[in-house]
Amino acid sequence: MTLQLVLIAAAALFCVGLYGALSQQVVVMVMMGLELMLNGVILAAAAFWWFLAPTPDGQVLLLVVIAAMTVEMAMGFAVATLLHRSRGSDMTDSATDLSG
Amino acid sequence: MLSTIVFSVLAVIALASGIAVFRVDSMARATYALAVSFVAVGALLLMFDLDYIGVITILMMVMEMAIMAIYMIMFMGMNPALMPMSMVHNKRWSAILAVGTFLLLAGGALLVPWPARSGSPATDLTASLGEAIMGSKMLVMLTVSPILFATIVAALVLANPRGRYDRWGDDLQRARPDDPQQGGLGK
Amino acid sequence: MGLRASIALGAVQSIHVLVVEVPGWGATRMRVEAELARRGWTAARSPADADVLLVCGVPGKKLESVCARIWSQLPGPRARVAVHNASDVASGLEKAAAELLDEGRQQGDARTRSHQPVEASDEIEHVGHGGSEESAEHSKPMDMDMDAEMDMSMDMDMPMPGGIPLASGGPDRDGLEMDVLHVALGPVLPHWPAGLVVHCALQGDVIVSAEPDVLPAALQPNNDGPIGNNSRSAHDERRSTVARLSDAAVQVLALAGWSYAAGRARRIRDEVAAGTALVDVAADLDSLARSVSRSWLLRWALNGITVGDAFANTGEGAGRHEPETVRGRLIGWLDEARRIARYNTEAYESPDNPELQRSLLDAIPQLLSGTDVATARLIVASLAIQTAQIAQAREPRT
Amino acid sequence: MTDAAGTNPAWALLAPVVLGLLALAAAALNGILVARAEGRTLRSGAAAPVFEVARLMRQRRRTTVAADVLLWRIGCSGLVVVALLKTAVIPVGPWVLADIPVAIVWFNAMDVMVWAVVWLIGWGANSAYSLIGGYRFLAQAVSYELPLMFALVTPAVAAHSLRVSDVIAAQQELWFIVWMPVAFVVFCLSVVAFSSWGPFATAASGDIAGGILTEVSGVDRLLILAGRYALLTTGAAFAVALFLGGGAGPLLPDWLWTLVKTLLLLAAFVVVRHRLPEVRPDRLAEVAWMIVLPVVLLQTLIVSIVVAVRG
């Protein structure tokens, strides 16, 4: 197990998530793509921490990433509910007018 | 050697279930595939001695995915029947972009001369994490907590269609709130 | 004795029986429940849970087809028994146990029955299924409801996995567009009025609309149950009223999830039905009524669940301003039962009142819309509809 | 990751057996209570779980039209697996499978697994009643989970450790139940809730034809029912370790004390079922968030202050 190996795995996870986030139409599926990207980020961050500088401070970064995931998720659900309520739809394409 | 094998197995599980998220035909399966991916990454974190973070990742993500499954069903209305679904747009460009990013990142991972390891992990990582949070990195956590609180409030405001005037009447004089589903306290 | 045989012997010690009550055979059903409790058997909650399908009474054509469908849902080893009056109950159960023990017969049954996946229990009555694998099922005459037919034509061009059309959406009470699921509550549900079917449109577990119907019996029960028996003394009348009231209390208590109190009410009911003097159960009734009205958890759980103005025009509810609550009805039943048991008074509410029962049935759509399934079940149970009288009243028309 | 001290290979084989026996004892007690209520002999009640096992072994499994069989079967076997994974961190006297430094978080992560598993059981069958059962469980879960988390954290704060053996060691002088009773009660209620048992069994209640159990038969049903009892057992054993001093007690060896205390607590859980009506999740939510959660937080705060003052 080397740093390179872990980073490649993390990059693969990240890119699967990226593909999902870009290609999916439904808000909830886009969120799943984002989650998967963050999953890759967690793995990469843990690898950097372990192989480069295993100091206590590094772990805090991981906690922050996890906190970011919850925020993303909570806001995603709220926006999905709002979209669903106001338009009866949860497709990202139908929300393009939000970009103004 | 053993650790490489365990790592590879877990990484393959994480990746395969990650891919499955966008390949399977049912919302429930997609959600649970993502949960499996997170559990595998959580187990990988345990390999780096990150006990606390690893278990917390598993805990949080399984919880999140169980809730996610409900949203999936609520908003997308699939029966467990394996309903073929394809809800993608610009699939081709997404794929190209994703593969490109992967090549870039993987190339970086292989080509960058990573520095040697400096320092060594503390004997009790969980305790050291706690000391970091309550000590040198307290500011980070002090920032994160109001953000989380703001998220709760913002998410509720966005998602809840009924304000207190809907519930308690225009003059807020009702004895009991007018809710579609009565709560346990009547508040 | 081989392992197989000893497992089978153990298995028949705690048989789960799915009891289907045909309107009018309430007394037989109560007798079955008493007999199950005596033997340490269990009343099954769903076809998947059951070893024995026991039909109390003679079902009409529709109810018969429901029974056939449920029979196909029993996992097996399985046995089917029909009981037509209370004295047959014990022998019927014995027969079922013997049938379950008969290895050869069960193996033959397993070989010959269809091995297609069965429908889920909520699909008891209908329709909506157009898949090829079920065409065999549908070759027998079955009436289709209008709404389901409409669903089918709408969804014809959609892919239908397993022959089930996808749910279509509709606005829900929280202003979200939600899928609408068509589910028939009943006719075979635990603690549910006999033969009643409520065709519901569900969003999640919230009922959007409800359409009640009663599946009648094929013939009148004879000398069994509260109706069809005109030559009863006043004493029998009191006795059957106490049994009926405590049976109604059993249903509500069981649906509130209070199995202990429901069991006590059931024991009182069974004792009365078995011939214990009314005075002897009065003390039990008193203590049950006391613990029910004292339970703050029950008060909290049932708080705010009302039967609306369903009883506003009857003698029972006349002059009230507040809508009657489910808890109020429950306590009312217990109080009346102990009053009848203790003092020699006449039954206040006459059970033979087809118009009242009819109006209760008609109140269901309005009472149930917007409630969740748990609340709806409590409301229906607290109406204590005597479906037999409705089926009887409608007989000439069908 | 694991601390090998105290790990005994024989215990790895014995632990599931002990778990099974305790779960069976709980089922027998339940049978006895039912038999007593129905006026039958207590012996027939005690044998009821054995008969039930025989019945379910003999019964065939079934599938429903368009069921998601893969997820359904995973869900059905999941509860037992989760209970076994919980057992791994519970010490019984000198033996424990994995005395990991984050055992309390591990226990918590496993009861979150129950969320996923129960919902799967409800979802897989493609039946409205089952699915409603699954929804009900999740609605209940969001009510009990946060109070449960803080109830778990409280003993950890007092013991300065998330390791169960440290928590037991910290109770040498005073059992935690004495000065954190609120956390203990909340923890016990949560155990009953995540086992969907008794007053918190709305996910499998009769008004929806058995809810998550509506469509399962045979071995699947056996696994779910066994899993519920096993979850109840692990919950009781964990409460003993966290609040009741683990194996501390006079005369008897500590492993025996652990088992005795676990059995007593388990019996209390089983009795609760026969005493109380069900608590509907829609009613529970408001109470859990507006009363129980602040009270548990207050408990945690008090314990933290005491710990800080004592140094």
Image (spheres, rainbow, N blue to C red):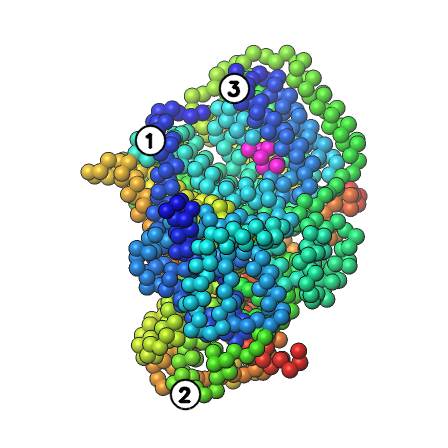
Please state the chain letter of the residue tagged with numbered disc 1 in the rendered image.
D
Q: Please, is residue C245 above or below residue D295 in the view?
A: below
Q: For mark 2, give the secondary structure.
A: loop
Query: Is residue B108 left or right of D71 when viewed as pictured?
Result: right
Q: For mark 1, give the secondary structure.
A: loop
Of all residues, the one furthest to the front in this rendering is C104
Residue B3 badge: 3
Question: Magenta segment, which residues?
Answer: B33-39
Mark 1 Cα shell of 10 Å, populated few (<14), some (14-19), many (≥20) = many
Q: Amino acid at mark 2?
A: Ser
Residue situated in front as seen by the camera: B177 or A32: A32
Do the numbered discs 3 and 2 sit on residues whose CB atoms are within 8 Å?
no
Q: Amino acid at mark 3?
A: Ser
Magenta stretch holds residue B37: yes
Residue depicted at 50% across the width and 41% down the height: D78
Image quadrant where residue A8 sits:
top right
Image quadrant where residue C380 sits:
bottom right
**Mark 1 to mark 3: distance in Å?**
27 Å
Please state the chain letter of the residue tagged with numbered disc 3 in the rendered image.
B
Residue C233 badge: 2
**Mark 2 to mark 1: distance in Å?**
71 Å
Residue C245 locus on image (x, y percent):
44, 76
Please state the chain letter of the residue tagged with numbered disc 2 in the rendered image.
C
